[in-house]
Image (tube, rainbow, N blue to C red):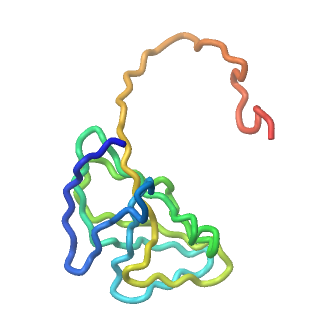
């Protein structure tokens, strides 16, 4: 597995993200809130993490939901995956939404999302008059069956 070094600055008391296990794909992001944040059903909030990162050029970080709170409570990351570009230096924040039926409370230190680092490729678009044929063709949503 490839390893990269990412610079990190934290606000006083914020937690440096860690992998939950040796084979975890993402590091856990934790809430850095002053007091409990209660998300009612269909409410969303921008939750700070207290961390600032310097991602190397050629990489991005993706903010993704945690499966446990998504399954048990219906709480997910609204713009999943949220992309953090390598030139962004602001605080990492997570847009959470409660799609569940009950209020969901977020406390300081709660694991609210995960962050995965990915290598990027740049593309150069080449204008053409037509594209090569495939068996799917222009078939859209649901065109390959259930």
Nearer the observer, 1 or 53: 1
Determine whether 84 is above or below 106 in the image. above
Q: Position of residue 21 (x, y in %)?
A: 43, 62
Nearer the observer, 74 or 125: 74
Q: Position of residue 100 (x, y in %)?
A: 65, 75
Which residue sits at x=43%, y=78%? 110
Q: Quadrant of the N terminus?
A: top left
User: In screen coordinates, is 13 left or right of 107?
Assistant: left
Nearer the observer, 86 or 19: 19
Q: Position of residue 105 (x, y in %)?
A: 51, 84
**What is the residue that sits farthest to the right in this orientation?**
146
**What is the residue that sits farthest to the bottom in this orientation?**
35
Please give the count of numbered marks on the rendered protein: 0
Which residue sits at x=69%, y=24%? 138
User: In screen coordinates, is 102 left or right of 120?
Assistant: right
Which residue sits at x=56%, y=82%? 104
Which residue sits at x=34%, y=52%? 84
Nearer the observer, 110 or 42: 110
């Amino acid at each position: 597995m490839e390893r990269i070094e990412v610079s990190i600055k934290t606000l006083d008391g914020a937690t440096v993200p860690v992998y939950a296990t040796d084979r975890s794909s993402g590091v856990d992001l934790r809430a850095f809130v002053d007091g409990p944040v209660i998300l009612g059903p269909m409410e969303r909030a921008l939750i700070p993490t207290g961390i600032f990162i310097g991602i190397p050029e050629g990489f991005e970080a993706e903010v993704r939901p945690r499966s446990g709170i998504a399954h048990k409570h219906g709480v997910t990351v609204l713009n999943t995956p949220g992309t953090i570009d390598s030139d962004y230096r602001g605080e990492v924040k997570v847009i959470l939404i409660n799609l569940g039926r009950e209020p969901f409370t977020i406390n300081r230190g709660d694991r609210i999302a995960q962050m995965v680092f990915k290598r990027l490729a740049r593309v150069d678009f080449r204008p053409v008059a037509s594209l090569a044929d495939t068996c799917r063709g222009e078939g859209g949503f649901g065109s390959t069956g259930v």
